[in-house]
Amino acid sequence: MKFAEVILPVPIPKSFCYSIPPMMDVAIVVGHRVLVEFGNRKMYTGIVSEIHDKHPDKYEPKPILEVLEVEPSVNPSQIKLWKWIADYYMCTIGEVLNVALPSGLKLSSQSYIQLHPHFIIQENLEILNDREFTLLSHLEKEQTIPYTQVGNIIQLKSPYKTIKDLIAKEAILLIEQIKEKYKPKMEKRIRLTEQYAENPESLDQLFEQLGKKAKQEDALLKYLTLVPVHEDHLSNYHGVAKKDFIHSGRALSPSSVGTMTKNGIFEEFERQIPRYELTASDKMQPTPQLSDAQNECLHKTIKGLEEKNVCLLHGVTGSGKTEIYLQLIQGVIQNGEQALFMIPEIALTSQLVRRLKVYFGDVLGIYHSKFSDNERVETWKGVQEGRFQVVVGTRSSLFLPFSDLSLIIVDEEHDSSYKAHDPAPRYQGRDLALVLAHFHHAKVVLGSATPSLESFYLAAKQKYAYAGLSERYGDAQLPEIKIIDIKSKRKQKKMKDDFSDDLLQTLHQTTEEGHQAILFQNRRGYSPYVTCNVCSWVPTCPSCNVNLTYHIYKNELRCHYCGHKEHVPNTCVSCGSTEIKTVGLGTQKVEEGLKDYLTDLRVGRLDLDTTRRKHSYEQILIDFEHGHIDVLVGTQMVTKGLDFSNVRVVGILDADRLLYFPDFRAHERAFQLLTQVSGRAGRRGEKGTVILQTTTPNETLFAKVARHDYRNFYRKEIAERQQYHYPPFTRLIKLTIRSEKQELTKESAQWLGNRLVNWLGRKRILGPQEPNINKIRNYFLSEILIKLERENFDLKKAKNYIHHAILQLKEEKNFKRVWVTIDVDPN
Ligand code: ADP
Ligand code: ZN
Ligand code: ZN
């Protein structure tokens, strides 16, 4: 007897053993998707992770019900990666599977009831009450009725409610119907039937017959021009797409085509087509010639990769790092291998894909979270079959089934969007790229104008190779950064609301000259809160401990943590006054303000609120690129990677806000954001201008941004990290404790903290401490930060302690309703 270990999408930290029935249609191998029963009649799609012949000691394994595919969807190196993630990020492998496998490859199941085949209603009338009789008669007609199960209770939609008795009377059966979610996209096509295609003379006869039926004759002629049947049977075999045939050129009447199909001249058939096609309109081009500086950098990178496998490509904004990546990818394609090009944000995909498809065409695949389930499955399959040799994607593309990966590029490697938050696994995409590459013996290029402290530190220690580009490509220069002191400007009456005269004048001038601008404000909505002018009352979220943000376009207050919405009150709830005013600056207010002061400008906005729909990113960016928008206002989405040649001016409305996050990375993030957003200005042609508004103009960090002085920023920052024992000198693990009662959260966090102090020592434990926002979605939060040494330290043992302490906490009677999440290397 053979057994299979199956990974299931459940939060239990192990795989589960199932027996392999001897007569399965397909020989089961590692990586197969299989259907199994788990727990109470629940069906799951699982992945086989191991095959062996050891019968489990403690239970009788259930059989695998079905193998869902011929070729396994997952390869062994992916399973190895999943195990690594579960281990390092301290979650279950089921949680990894849940995130790694696109939901289009999971099955959806629906439960139904059905009349029992041996039950005849007419013969059992005396044991049925009226309601049961009605239900069974209905079932007889409808065949099945869906039900839901909550615990042990089976529920139908009213009026039937429960059906326990009917099950006992063996009148009905419960069935589970399993559906594949992925649906290939099919196209209706049309071709000549064999009779005509293989026998040109019969076509001549046909023309004679059709003589008087002009429309049909037209259709036939048109078909023959599109598909020259006489020369090549094969082209007839593929036929033409029905919609093209009927709608292109002179329109044909669908009815005459229908008649011809009925008469056996044409036949319809279907063919699977890709959901996204990249080659369609563009001509392929050779990759661009590199400048001397780029060439030198490329060679340094290649040599560095040979020596150290990982190379940090540190090139200022606009230096042409992308073109260097292109050369590296080109090499990979020529070797018949695969490359992964990772980017931090979906916002960047559309522009990058437009740039890349002219070089790589149909070997280029795309993968990100705005893709539909079906599209993701197609990329998955394309990568598996080796059709896609290059994939552009966000962090989840690390989970694709690469077989021959030889290069990973992590562009904007410093970007915090590489870190996954909820649900587990809370992985860091850049770090995971290094692990994946290691498994594949592949190379990694980490690219950035503002490298993460971690990466620069490792390059400085020569663990990574380093290649730098200190000049922009071509004649372009780095922008001039002007620091504007808004406090003194306000005294001099040189401020219009949140805009300095300098900013407004610069915007006016640059748009007059036909150029564009980007304005950055890292807050969405209109104003971060509203308040009563008389008593200072501020509306807060009922479920979270935060102020509600005012959104002007729907005139409502919203919670950015749980999504709660409410109307803006006309009168103060606390004192009844009608003087409610807005406070603070969000992107909507920037947009509105600009329209007030510079009336002719066309203003666009890029933030979470304007990009929720699938193609909205793309549309806004295309409008900007085509010059339909003069000024683009946005949150951090506008700071990254975008390459618009006509942008001359960048405005940063409130640089201070970035500095005061209660986080050891606040300064690093601020430097990166400010440098990156400035980097959008003057990427081609004349030098650009950045207007940085602040109330603390003497802040040294701003001066470093203005001088484009990464190294000095690094030196100061790394010294502080060393002094206060923060990464990269230590490793952090953050525990978040949650419960519905503030007191309970506090007690349990204290309990857990004490346990950890006992085991790991006082100096390694910070907290427990309430975070700034101590209540989200009705859960009260507390945090414990664990600081562990990087060297000469048994990390595995420490992680075991942590797991153990959490398990013990959950076993305490008082703490049953407490939850703990673990975040390794938190952001
Ligand atoms: P980075 O990613 O380093 O910020 P990009 O790769 O976006 O910079 O390059 C900046 C601009 O310069 C882009 O518009 C790009 O097309 C152009 N560019 C860079 N290198 C070349 C090259 N070798 N040939 C032509 N254009 C280039
Ligand atoms: Zn009031
Ligand atoms: Zn809320």
Image (spheres, rainbow, N blue to C red):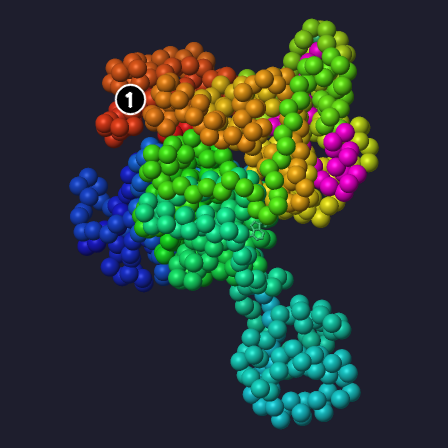
Disc 1 residue type (three-letter): Ala
Label 1 crowd (10 A; few <14 / some 14-19 / many >=20): some
Where residue 153 sits: x, y (%)?
A: 43, 35
| Span colored in magenta | 505-532
* Position of residue 597 in the picture relative to residue 162 (left or right): right
* Position of residue 304 in the picture relative to residue 606 (left or right): left
- Taking depth in this image into account, of 778 and 443 the one nearest to the observer is 443
* Position of residue 81 in the picture relative to residue 379 (left or right): left
Asked if the stretch drawn in magenta spans residue 527, the answer is: yes
Q: Quadrant of the C terminus?
A: top left
Asked if the stretch drawn in magenta spans residue 424, the answer is: no
Q: Residue furthest right?
A: 599
* Position of residue 794 in the picture relative to residue 291 (left or right): left
Residue at 48% over, 52% down: 295
Q: Quadrant of the N terminus?
A: bottom left
**Observer able to see residue 444:** yes
> Relative to residue 739, is residue 263 depicted above or below?
below
- Describe the element under mark 1 as helix, strand or loop: helix
Residue at 37% over, 18% down: 723
Where residue 5 sits: x, y (%)?
A: 27, 47
Q: Quadrant of residue 677?
A: top right
- Taking depth in this image into account, of 271 and 128 the one nearest to the observer is 271
Tag 1 residue:
805
Residue at 31% over, 42% down: 83
> Relative to residue 461, is residue 284 depicted above or below?
below
- Taking depth in this image into account, of 268 and 751 the one nearest to the observer is 751
**Observer able to see residue 143:** no
Q: How many marks?
A: 1
Residue at 71% over, 11% down: 532
> Relative to residue 239, is residue 786 depicted above or below?
above
Where residue 646 sits: x, y (%)?
A: 69, 44
